[in-house]
Image (cartoon, grey):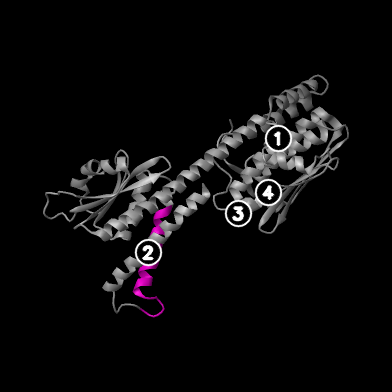
Amino acid sequence: MSGELLAGLLPVGCALFAAGVAAGRWWAGRSTGRSGPGLGTPVQRATFQTLHTASLAAPPLRAGLTEDTARKAVRRLRPLLGTEALCLTDREAVLAWDGPGAGHHWDLVMAKASGILESGRSLTVETGCPDPLCPLRWAVIAPLTGEEGVLGALVAYGSRESAVLVRAATELARWVSVQLELAELDRSRTRLIEAEIRALRAQISPHFIFNSLAAIASFVRTDPERARELLLEFADFTRYSFRRHGDFTRLDDELRSIEQYLALAGARFGERLTLTLQVAPEVLPVALPFLCLQPLVENAVKHGLEDSVEECRITICARDAGTEAVVTVEDNGVGMEPAVLRALLAGEGPASSGIGLRNVDERLRQVYGDDYGLVMETGVGAGMKVTVRVPKYRAGVHPDAGAQPF
């Protein structure tokens, strides 16, 4: 999908630049003799202005096609065409209008756009406006498309029929369509991340919950105070793990949840579990994907305690590495063959194996890029060390203040 989208972006970007050059030449004809030192030629200035205007119109469209986003974008788009009026529609109604003539043309737009909403082909129509003072005599109607077909239309009005306006409006509609496709990709990415978080929550299995409650129950008579403390830890752990909304969290919140998880595991395994926690205070506020460390610790417990009869030592280290925070989770468990681990991360193992590790690896790559996948060191009988690197700052990655407990 990303390759296809990039292939689609290139011709549209070239077309938009060409439109800027054409606009520059038009402005140059009107601005002869007005260029100043160091400001470039009139063509260059107009091209830069075109690209700047396009960059201002893009952010609203990246949120999808709605009345609010169309209203914000249409004010920026009309200067790109230099047309008398411009409107954006969805498949049902006009969303936004910029320029004169809205009063008596608004209700006629959808009737004229119905053909391209079905065919997906641009067309020009005469408005047939009875007002002799109205400048809107011709309209170019171009489709706005997405993965699901035609989403709406871009309608550009002019005082006369013009091949230049037809070409410019068609190319601008293609550019708008690319922004809408990117918006859909963003929504798909969000839905995917939410689905993966639901999968992780499902992996906080009834088996673990049952064992935690059984361990708490074992202390009710012999050590009521510890049973109370463990029950509070269990409540806080489940409240955090099953909270609603929020793709990202703070490192200190994630580490606190891990401490609660290990406290519950320690109630079951007793002195067989030893935890060492080394955290640099400056990385505690760093944002990272929600529930991206807990599966690593759960994996360490499984291979260090459940699959071994030896004492389990788990070391969690979070350190400052310049522009990045680096977190390592290390255990002295049974480890595994590196080839088996690669197969698990590739999804080639049993359906229930490696889900948590694969889930975390994929989410880190989706958010930060392929350079930020999990780094895992292991061998049979040699334990396992998992390293997570996250940038201290990445646009769009911040703890969600609106996340609520379940």
Between 342 and 384, the residue placed more toward the observer is 342
**Is the residue under label 1 in contact with that under label 4 (CB below 8 Å)?**
no
Q: Nearer the viewer, mark 4 or mark 1?
A: 1
> Label 2, on which residue?
18
Which of labels 3 and 1 is toward the front?
1
> Quarter of the image containing the C terminus?
top right
Q: Is 167 on the left-hand or right-hand side of 355?
A: left
Mark 3 sits on what residue? Answer: 393
Q: Which residue is mark 1?
A: 349
Tell me residue 79's x, y (percent). Answer: 31, 60
Q: Are marks 2 and 4 in contact (CB under 8 Å)?
A: no
3 or 2: tag closer to the N-terminus: 2
The label nearer to you, 3 versus 2, is: 2
Q: Which mark is residue 284?
A: 4
**How far is the residue under mark 2 from the one under mark 4?**
48 Å
**Residue type at tag 4:** Leu
* Picture quadrant of residue 49: bottom left
